């Protein structure tokens, strides 16, 4: 497995370096550009991307990458990759712009479509979640205390289910998901979080299920998926119940459910 050759601590340090640079911009005034897809872009996205790619190239020059803020690579090339990095220099740029702290640096390693390593760093919150196959899944807090994340009870076994998502952007599909749980006499509670923090709070045990019936890209989910999966959870396609996979021809994810 390619992950055996990767130093998780080094990837964590790369994420911290990117986070430090992001926070320098976060503390001051910054301009916002709009990309062709109408999503926002800041100098922080750019510097984070530069730091991550430079460091990965220095330490692991043979591993290709897919990054939100780099030129798209054609599938005719990518389909031959057995492994690659999936990078989101800032997941939650809108949260960064709002200065609410709920944004993350995401770095994941994919092997044969499966996330086998992931680092999610929230620099404003000074918390990191990281995982590697064979080593485990962890949360590291501001005091540098490292906590092992372990499997929780499956949400369908619980009488009260904490759904993580957004109250204000509730889709019909999410409403139907909740309605099905209520027919099973489940009490429903909501937990709100931005960006990849949804996966991380689920992995910590602060939520029970994350149904996502809205568009996401592979770089949005890969690192958080790794943290949850290696802790014992799963992320499945909502329509097929198959595991969510990566480096697809279309980098847009299908709707999914992240759960224990």
Image: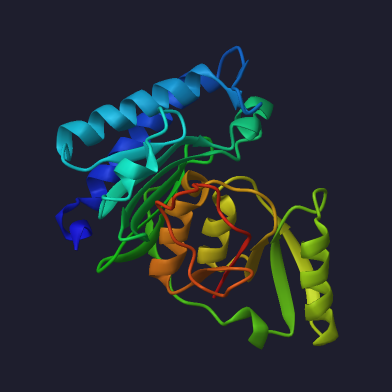
The x, y position of residue 120, in whole percent, is 44, 47
Quadrant position of residue 162: bottom right
Nearest the viewer among 195 and 1 is 1
Quadrant (top left, top right, bottom left, bottom right) of the N terminus: bottom left
Q: Residue at x 56, y 75 (%)?
A: 241
Classify residue 184 as left or right of residue 39: right
The x, y position of residue 66, in whole percent, is 37, 39
The x, y position of residue 128, in whole percent, is 43, 48
Q: Residue at x 77, y 71 (%)?
A: 177
Query: What coloring was used for the rendering?
Result: rainbow
Classify residue 117 as left or right of residue 166: left
Quadrant position of residue 55: top left
In the displayed structure, would residue 59 be above or below residue 84?
above
Q: Residue at x 59, y 31 (%)?
A: 93
The x, y position of residue 123, in whole percent, is 47, 36
Nearest the viewer among 93 and 242 is 242
Quadrant position of residue 33: top right
In the displayed structure, would residue 237 be above or below residue 212?
below
Q: Residue at x 33, y 54 (%)?
A: 110
Q: What count of labels does the image hold?
A: 0
Farthest front residue in view: 76
Quadrant (top left, top right, bottom left, bottom right) of the C terminus: bottom right
């Amino acid at each position: 497995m390619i992950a055996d050759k990767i130093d998780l601590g080094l990837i964590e340090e790369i994420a911290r370096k990117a986070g430090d640079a992001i926070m320098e911009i976060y503390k001051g005034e910054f301009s916002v550009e709009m990309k062709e897809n109408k999503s926002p872009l800041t100098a922080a996205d750019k510097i984070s991307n530069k730091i991550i790619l430079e460091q990965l190239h220095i330490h692991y020059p043979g591993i290709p990458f897919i990054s939100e803020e780099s030129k798209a690579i054609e599938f005719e090339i990518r389909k031959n990759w057995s492994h690659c990095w999936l990078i989101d220099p800032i997941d939650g740029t809108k949260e960064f712009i709002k200065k609410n702290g709920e944004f993350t640096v995401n770095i994941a390693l994919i092997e044969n479509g499966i996330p086998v390593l992931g680092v999610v760093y929230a620099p404003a919150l000074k918390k990191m979640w990281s995982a590697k196959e064979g080593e485990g899944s962890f949360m590291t807090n501001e005091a540098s205390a490292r906590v092992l994340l372990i499997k929780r009870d499956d949400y369908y076994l619980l009488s009260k289910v904490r759904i993580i998502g957004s109250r204000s952007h509730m889709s019909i599909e999410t409403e139907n998901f909740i309605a099905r749980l209520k027919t099973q006499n489940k009490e429903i509670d909501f937990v709100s979080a931005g960006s990849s923090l949804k996966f991380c709070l689920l992995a910590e045990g602060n939520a029970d299920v994350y149904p996502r019936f809205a568009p996401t890209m592979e770089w949005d989910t890969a690192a958080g998926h790794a943290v949850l999966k290696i802790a014992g959870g799963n992320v499945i396609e909502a329509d097929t119940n198959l595991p969510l996979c990566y480096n697809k021809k279309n980098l847009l994810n299908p709707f999914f459910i992240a759960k224990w």
